Amino acid sequence: MKKVVYITGCLGFIGSYITRTCLEKGWYVKGVDKMTYASNNNLLKEFKKYPNFSFVKCDINDLEFLYDCDYIINTAAETHVGNSIASSNEFIKSNIDGVHNILELIRNYRQEHSQPPILIHFSTDEVYGDIEKGFHIETDILNPSNPYSATKAAADQLITAWNRTYNLPYVIVRPTNNYGIGQYVEKLIPKSIKFLELGRRIPLHNGGTPIRNWLHAQDTADAVMTIIKNMDAHVVNNIYNIAGGFEQENIITVKKIIKEYFGKENYSFYIDTSFDRKGQDVRYALNDDKLRLLGWKPKKIFNEELPLIVEYYKDKFIW
C-alpha cells in the first residue's frame, strides 16, 4: 500500500532528499514550505513532474488543517547557529511554535479519526550538548549550548509531552552534521567553496578545532525510510540517533576542500582562524546502535563524496 506523507520544509536541504526518496517510491507527498532564503525553489520544477506530488506554500505556524495521511515528516526549521546567537526570535517561532502548531493539528485530527498520523520530527545531535570523548545515546540528558539547539530541545520535549498527555504517536530523529549537494551556502562546506570562488579567506571559529561527525543527506533520508519500513509498536514513540560514522576537525574538512578546489595543498592564505563564537562546542558524537538494529547503516563515504560536491558548486551553483 502506498504511503501518504506530509513533508514540511520539502524545499530545504534534508527535506528535499526525503521528498525525492518518497516520490521515487511512488508515495503521495504533500509538500509544505514557506520558501525562505534557505529553500531551493528550483526544486519545485523537479518535484512537480511527479503526479504523486502536491505543494502548498505555507509557514508551519499557519497550517490550519491536515489532509488524511500516514506520516508528517517535519524538517522545517531555522538551523544556522550563528543566526540564532544574533537573534533567536525566528528560531523560537519556527522551531518551537511551529512544532506546537503541528502537534495541535494532530491532536485535533485525532478527535475525528481513530488513527492519527505519526509525526517523524527532525531534531539534532546538538540537543545533547558537546562531548569530548565517547558518544551520546538517546537516553542522555539534553544539555544544549546555544539558542538554536535550545529551541530544538524544547520541541523534543513538547513532542514527548504531547505523546504522554494526548497519546500522539511520534518518532524523533537526531542526525549528526549533514552534507551533500544542494546545501545552502551558510553551512561549512558550500560556504568554504563560495569563499574560494570569491577569493576570500574561509572563516573558522575557535581555530577550526571543533569536531563534527559527517552524515550524507541521502543516508539521512534512507534512515527515515528504514524507520517507516519497520514501524510497529516497538519503533513508534521512540528517539533514534543517526550518525555518519566519520568525524574530523573543521579545519581538516576545509583543508580537504581547498585541496580539491585548487588541486594542491595551499592552505595558509585561504583560512582565517581568528574568529570565536559564543557557546562554541567542542565535539558532537552519537551512538546510533539502536537505529542500526533496524537494518540501516550509512553508505556514503565522506572522502569520496567531497570531490563531487566541490565540483558541483564550482560548475553549477549560482551564488
Image (spheres, grey):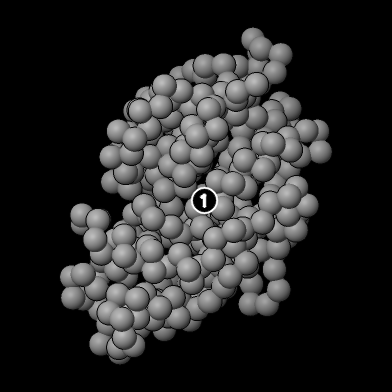
Of the residues shown, which amino acid type is indicated by label 1? Gln
Q: Quadrant of the C terminus?
A: bottom left
Q: Is residue 129 left or right of residue 34?
A: right
Asked if 126 appears above or below 102 in the picture, the reply is below
**Whole-percent x, y for residue 78 in the image:** 42, 48
Q: Quadrant of the N terminus?
A: top right
**Whole-percent x, y for residue 185 in the image:** 31, 59
Q: Which residue is mark 1?
A: 218
Q: Secondary structure at mark 1?
A: helix
**Whole-percent x, y for residue 127 in the image:** 59, 57
User: Viewer-proximal residue, 305 or 245?
Assistant: 305
Residue located at (48% from left, 27% from top): 29
Q: Is residue 44 left or right of residue 154?
A: left
Asked if 97 appears above or below 272 in the picture, the reply is above
Q: Residues within 10 Å of mark 1 (few under 14, many from 20)?
A: many
**Whole-percent x, y for residue 65 in the image:** 49, 17
Residue 281 in view (yes/no)? no
Residue 46 in view (yes/no)? yes
Residue located at (65% from left, 17% from top): 110
Q: Is residue 96 left or right of residue 184?
A: right
Q: Quadrant of residue 261?
A: bottom left
Residue located at (38% from left, 64% from top): 308
